[in-house]
Image: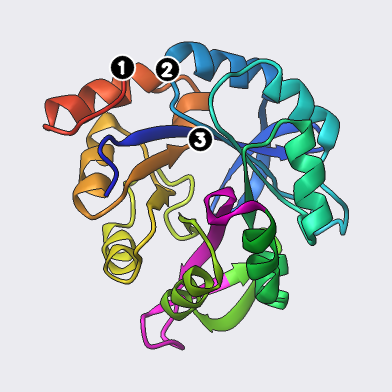
Amino acid sequence: MSLSVRVIPCLDVANGRVVKGVNFKNLRDAGDPVELARLYFEQGADELTFLDVTATVDNRSTTYDVVRATAEQVFIPLTVGGGIRSVEDVSRLQASGADKVGINSAAIARPVLIAEIADRFGAQVIVLSLDVKRSERTESGFIVTTHGGRTETDIDAVAWAREAIELGAGELLINSIDADGTKQGFDTELISLMRANSRVPVIASGGAGRVEDFPPAVRSGADAVLAASVFHDEILTIGDVKRELASAGMLVRS
């Protein structure tokens, strides 16, 4: 695990606006991505994750101008995902200010894309985003989905994570669709399972509702914790989460 736990706000963006829903459905407007990015940077976020949640569904590229405007406002690592299908897309995103890229649907469709990006830019650039649902159809009990959670596959989430790491993925972003937006806590079973099968950092996402939800995710093996609606709705601040983690004996960045 990392020396210190990273706290990462997530900006799910559609049509140039931050959106949030429950279980990846019923998206509602949550604000301007540039303004929110600046706010979270000022609050002490360790990184930012920017996901264009309709880019793959709409069969288009990520909105580069929003990425560029966001990168101009924050001076912490920025991960951008959504609609990335090629090495050229990664190159263009880096030119727009992205430090890392999140890939999901395109990598499932063509796994060698992970190796192509890793060979060109290094594994540290690749965050494999897994939108995961519980299912009895796989050995692990979890499957991965594509197209913003809209399309289920028969792929075992744990087996896919292991394959992606071998191909060159440098981090795993584990999005629990079942927990997403529920504010009932992270899926610690899923986090523990991924930690046991990963030699790269694991980012936990989905389900945060209270400061007390964050330490169990870290105890289960998360190197970083990611949340969206609790920050967008001003239920919690970055500082609130870091203080709770610190009080639980976990190292956080000031």
Q: CA distance from mark 2 to mark 3?
A: 15 Å
Queried whether the magenta region covers residue 132, the answer comes back as yes
Queried whether the magenta region covers residue 37, the answer comes back as no
Residue 146 visible within the image: no
Which residue is the site of mark 2?
44
Say which mark, if any, is on residue 254: 1
Where 254 falls versus 202 (above or below)?
A: above
Where disc 3 sits, the SS reads: loop
Q: Please state the extent of the stretch shown in magenta in the rendering.
A: 121-144
Q: Residues within 10 Å of mark 2 (few under 14, many from 20)?
A: some
In the rendered image, residue 120, in percent from the top left (x then y), is placed at: 69, 57
Amino acid marked by disc 3: Ala
Residue 206 visible within the image: yes
In the rendered image, residue 59, in percent from the top left (x then y), is placed at: 87, 59
Choose between 83 and 138: the one closer to the eye.
83
Where disc 2 sits, the SS reads: loop
